[in-house]
Amino acid sequence: MANQEKLRVGVVGVGHLGQHHARVYTEIESCELIGVADVDAARGQEIAERHHVRYFQDYCELCEQVDALSIAVPTAHHHAVGMECLRRGIHVLIEKPISRTLEEADDLIALADANLRVLQIGHTERFNGAVVKLAELVDRPAFIESNRISPFPERSTDIDVVLDLMIHDIDVILSLVKSPVIKLDAVGVPVVTSKIDIANTRLEFACGCIANVTASRVSLKRERKMRIFQPDRYLSLDFQAQSLNVVDIQHAERRHDFPQSRPLIIPYQVEIHKQEPLKAELLAFVECAHTGGMPVVSGRDGRNALSAAFQILQAMRLAPYSAEKGYEEIS
């Protein structure tokens, strides 16, 4: 990439997540942050001044100045903003979830394909150093247990915990199992908000793997952990610590020096290249925009995670779901 010109980038929406996109872009040598756009002029100007770039009230004006954009606006606007940027021939990274409905996701994917533009979805956990290593070690997952819990947040309370937190683990699990979901059960209840604040789902895949996934935003502690069991191996991942512990099991029939009735259990901690997941994500996006390569988390990956999340919400039988209308709470 040394002989390539710097990619001109921008950020649309500089709230809680978007501000970090702007920061990280200034740390990447292969791109240049041109400006930021936000409907909140005071906020937009604050972030622009922090990074010595231009503020745009209208994101369409920013589009004229850049090659690629991060879109970190509320989910309800992902489709409109993403479609406009893709029409203008801009490479796009959209924060998760990809869109409000599957129909909107299909629109974004089709336009990106037609215009030969990169469409990457911001499922940042895929770039967690421990998850990157996990993907190398998992080949026959049989049972997965995932817990993502946190104290009540000050943001994202307008959506269910399934779309806010659980969707991170759904995306990681789908990337590991690589098999269709054939059955699921789910329960969830509102506690603090009118939306689902704590949820649990059991996913059964065509390959036989079972995943038990819990997400809560009404806990007294913060925990993000995943455990994977497969023949002859157990893996325990801590997203926050970016750590991965593995237990390998050697059976007696493969080891003539060990008693027949007792397997040899070998625990060890895997060396992890720790990194800021967001920076790794944006580095990958910039690289794809430069080369036209396939994103680690494509638009189709984002759609698959959204589809599974909607099926989970539908299984709770608290609201109807359709691909056209998305998830609608019963009043």
Image (cartoon, helix red, strand yellow):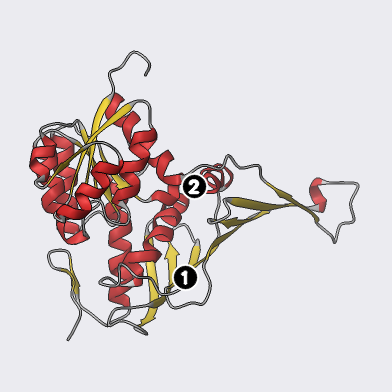
In percent of the image, x 17 and y 39: which residue is there?
Answer: 112
How far across and down, in percent of the image, does residue 301 sit? 32, 49
Image quadrant in which the C terminus is located: bottom left
Check disc 1 and report its element: helix, strand or loop: loop
Q: Position of residue 48 (x, y in %)?
A: 24, 43
Q: Is residue 289 left or right of residue 229?
A: left
Q: Earlier in the sequence, mark 2 or mark 1?
A: 2
| Residue at 54 percent of width and 55 percent of height | 141
Quadrant containing the N terminus in the rendered view: top left
Task: Place residue 199 in its image quadrant.
Answer: bottom left
Please determine whether, in this image, residue 284 is positioned above or below residue 217: above
Q: Nearer the viewer, mark 2 or mark 1?
A: 1
Judge left or right: residue 119 versus residue 233: left
Considering depth in this image, is 80 or 29 the residue closer to the camera?
29
What residue type is disc 2 on?
Asn
Residue 93, can we see it?
Answer: no
* Residue at mark 2: 128
Q: Residue furthest top?
A: 3
- The residue lying toward the viewer, choosing from 256 and 130, is 130
- Give the spatial CA distance, label 2 vs label 1: 18 Å
Q: Is residue 224 visible?
A: yes
Judging by the rendered image, the residue that carries numbered circle 1 is 150
Residue at image point 25% right, 72% down: 158
